[in-house]
Amino acid sequence: MRGGGRANAREAGVAEMRVDKFLQVSRLVRRRVLAQRLCDAGHVRVNDRRARAGTAVGPGDVLDLALGPRRLVVRVRRLPATPREADGAYEVVREVTDEGWWG
């Protein structure tokens, strides 16, 4: 094991991950602190419920993110252990901007 005895999500067989961590490793936001601030401000919803930073997400969950003038709805496909594994971690269900729906 690496990282001071902590296994990554794949090695441990973890089926859930904190929403702030998922947003960061999936590259939906650049920094985990930003993901935490979005959750604290009420801009993140998981399965139509307001999410706190520690809310658990797993494959099949739907995330609704308000990112300034942009609203992004994504479905979690898998939980990447690192940002290098982020490809295919989510699928965009809908994207809405001030101009209208672009889904």
Image (tube, rainbow, N blue to C red):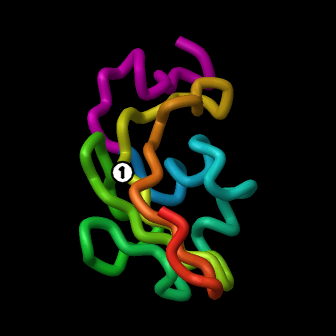
Which residue shows up at 49% across the image and 25% down it? 8
Q: Is residue 57 above or below residue 2?
A: below
Tell me where residue 45 appears, x and y as whole percent: 37, 74
Q: Is residue 29 above or below residue 52?
A: above
Looking at the image, residue 71 sits to the left or right of residue 78; the answer is right
Q: Which secondary structure, mark 1?
A: strand
Q: Which residues are magenta?
A: 1-16
Tell me where residue 14 appears, x and y as whole percent: 31, 31
Q: Residues within 10 Å of mark 1 (few under 14, many from 20)?
A: many
Q: Is residue 30 above or below residue 70?
A: above
The three-letter code of the residue at mark 1 reads Arg
Looking at the image, residue 13 sits to the left or right of residue 101; the answer is left
Which sits in the foreground, 13 or 63? 63
The reply to whether the magenta stretch includes residue 3 is: yes
- Count the marks: 1
Name the chief secondary structure element in magenta: loop
